Amino acid sequence: MNDIAVNVNGNSRPLAGTPAHTTALDWLRSTGLSGAKEGCAEGECGACAVLLATPTTEGGTAWTSVNSCLVPVYALNGQEIVTSEGLGSPDALHPVQEKLAEAGGSQCGYCTPGFACSMAGEFYRGDRKAVDANDAEADEDCPVHDAEHGPNGFDLHALSGNLCRCTGYRPIRDAAYALGSPESDDPLQQRLADPAPVPVATAATVDGSRFIRPASLDETLRLLRDEPDALLVAGSTDWGVEVNIRGSRAPLVVAIEHHEELRTLVVGDDEIEIGAALPLSEVETRLNGSVPLLAQLFPQFASRLIRNRGTFGGNLGTGSPIGDTPPALLALGARVVLTSVDGEREVDLAEYFTGYRQSVRRADELIRAVRIPLPLAKVTSFQKIAKRRFDDISSVAVAFALDIEDGIVTAAKIGLGGVAATPLRARATEEMLIGREWNVATVRAASEILGGEGTPMSDHRASSEYRALMLNTALLKLYSTAVIESKEVSA
């Protein structure tokens, strides 16, 4: 316990004696670093954002913004973080802080430290490049012509998880777009050339509650066999909410996000295998649009702050019927790899869910990976119906994956979320489509069937009638989009 510590703003701070359920935010504030704030305690406002040193594929470091209100502080043992206090000081502002001040990007200031940290993460992004708006050859890919990117290459999605209720977003955006590149002597920039800290094995017991980060996957699997009630945590974007909002406490929390076996991404001839604990932001970056259905999903999955920690394994492990990734994975025909001390088994995702937040996964098993068969369907679409365009929970999610040859639907997979106790395949609609002409008459007939799939319920997000109506119109939306795109290609 005496060796457990976190490097914060360049200084090692011990964790000894901290209760096992404590979040990084609460711990930071207890040490006097009160820059990070608790706004929502659910990972939606970003007031608690800090920078975490994470490894890059080249062996260096990236500064990754995360919600400190969701991360168990013991998961940061041996890790390195930077808070808003570590960016700069009143006498020597960080470039991000300086631009925010110049643009008038702060009024009450409650959200500002979180904005500064998220903005700094994008400031230091290695592949962020300014584009010359006068360069005609670069015109097609020029970020200045994209409403979500600045002329300096700043991606506004980096701030999608940060909310402000008094300043207004334009001055914050102006500050982001005014940023140049880090100076060569910037300490945080220089830090990126060195490797990120290696996760260290951790075992902490405080007042009867335990937090364990096993040294190996084999050790984790043995622990699950011996203590099947252990709670597995990777990004903690779901469990962190339970801790904060519902006061949930687990006698034993086991961290698994560091196991290399759970962080794979391999593209083979017949399938793509994605590790269950690889953060969604990394999956998005490494796939680089090669799976178009997932490329449509990622920007709509919560916020960048959440995707920097959230995982496929966590989304499937919770079994929530409103998780965003299951409908897309169902449409892709994904399979789940479950592993235990007895070996591995593979389960079709369509057979994985058995009831509300229940699945075929045994207590002694964990999700090691998801496998997406190749080749991919040619016509895909992910549609999320929510009250906000970004950073919101879906009322209904629909994913389509169709093959159409010579005007005939030859294969169809449709994944649904938010319309039943579990995510599910729209089997009746799929069967109706296969073998039919891809035309408006077929689509309208299939839409009537799709509107009756599942057992949608009414809640504070949407009525059952609204959910059914959204299902009814989803296929028509796909058809109209596909027709427009085909005309553009032929033109």
Image: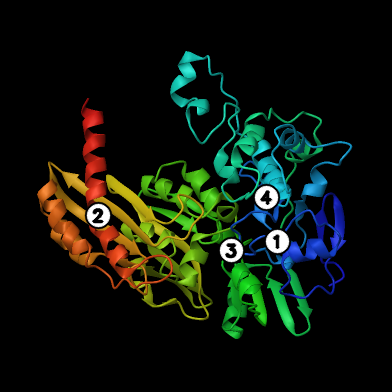
From where the camera sits, is residue 91 visible?
A: yes
Residue furthest to the right: 91
Q: Looking at numbered disc 2 in the image, what kind of residue is underneath it?
A: Thr
Mark 4 or mark 2, which is nearer the start of the sequence? 4
Element assignment for label 3: loop
Element assignment for label 1: loop
Residue 32, by quadrant, is bottom right
Q: With 150 as the anchor, is 300 left or right in this view?
A: left
Q: Which is more toward the observer, 287 or 28?
A: 28
Residue 349, by quadrant, is bottom left
Residue at the spot x=81%, y=57% of the render?
34
Q: Looking at numbered disc 4 in the image, what kind of residue is underneath it?
A: Thr
Q: Looking at numbered disc 1 in the image, what kind of residue is underneath it?
A: Glu
Residue 13, by quadrant, is bottom right
Q: Which residue is mark 4?
A: 54
- Work out which quarter of the rendered image holds the N terminus and state it: bottom right
Residue at the spot x=74%, y=65% of the render?
73
Mark 1 or mark 4, which is nearer the start of the sequence? 1
Q: For the residues labelled 3 and 2, say whether their Cβ atoms are less than 8 Å apart.
A: no
Residue at the spot x=76%, y=63% of the render?
77
Q: Which is more toward the observer, 268 or 72?
A: 72
Compared to residue 357, the image places residue 51 above or below, namely above
Residue 252 in percent (x, y) is at: 66, 80
Please state which of the two labelled residues, at mark 4 or mark 3, is closer to the viewer: 3
Q: Which residue is mark 3?
A: 237
Compared to residue 153, the image places residue 328 above or below, namely below
